[in-house]
Image: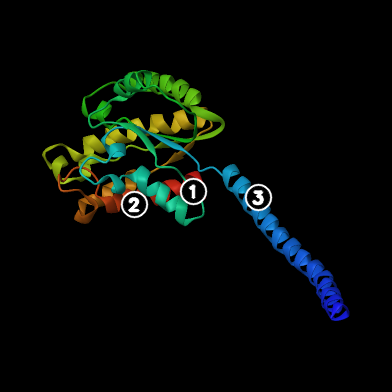
Amino acid sequence: MDIFIRSILVSVFLLSLSCNPQNNAENDISYSDIENENFESNEIDLINSSISKFNFLALGDSYTIGEGVNENERWPNQFVEVAYENGLDFEKPEIIAKTGWKTYDLLNAISQTNFTQKYDYVSLLIGVNNQFNSRSIDEFEEDLNKLMDKMNSLKKNNGNIIIVSIPDWGYTPFGNSYNREVISSEINLFNNSLINFANINGLKYVDITEISRRALNESNLLASDNLHPSGLMYLEWAKKIYETWID
């Protein structure tokens, strides 16, 4: 009986020796797999944390704040969507603009804003209210130089600035009670100042004025107020601005 019991114990011992290494190996493989998964996960997290979205500051007046349309139809918001469709990821644009603002209104607003960051992209679309209120070209150009200083202080070292032309409101039903030729002539003068300003400062300039003049025959390009652009026109602006600025 003793011999039989000893033989059973020896068998159990040998079986345990043959099983334990296998179990240890299995445990080692399992732990290694978890360790690799954790490493890969941490590596992905590090990569993701190093990828940041571009930020964008849009400066202007009613044409930038999107008078008469929903927020998602404003041209800066649609510009971000166009960029995303082309593989560039932007944060929601920050907009400093208000209906009726002239250049000095925008300057005052910038001075009163507490900025917490600098920007990869800065746009400027201003001047229609200077023209509408018969402000002088000289004043406009002086304010542009002041705005240039502001924009340089707001953009990152490798940041980009674009100047957007002034739309022609004379080609709208609202403009019918005014002299369209005079309005267009004055808008052209202000835009010529913007072109010179962009050239002097080495900035990109995009002409969206010709798109705005199509509103005379394409009512779907206007918002319900028959003065400001519709989301459809803003989309055309956004695409052209993207092509000129980034593409």
Task: Measuring from the top left, give residue 42's x and y in whole percent.
Answer: 63, 49
Residue 9, label in figure: none
Q: Earlier in the sequence, mark 2 or mark 1?
A: 1
Mark number, residue 43: 3
**Residue drawn 40% across the image and 31% down it:** 194
Splitting the image into 4 quarters, where does residue 92 fall?
top left
Q: Is residue 112 above or below residue 178?
A: above
Q: Residues within 10 Å of mark 1 (few under 14, many from 20)?
A: some
- Give the SS element for disc 2: helix
The residue where tag 2 is placed is: 235
Q: Mark 1 and mark 3 in contact (Cβ < 8 Å)?
A: no
> Which amino acid, mark 2?
Leu
Q: Find residue 48 and report its horizontal and vertical position in percent.
A: 58, 48
Report the amino acid beneath label 3. Glu
Describe residue 182's horizontal placement relative to residue 13 as left or right.
left
Residue closer to the observer: 1 or 221: 1
- Spatial separation of the CA atoms under disc 2 and disc 1: 18 Å
Q: Which residue is mark 1?
A: 89
User: Mark 3 and mark 2: span between their CA atoms?
Assistant: 39 Å
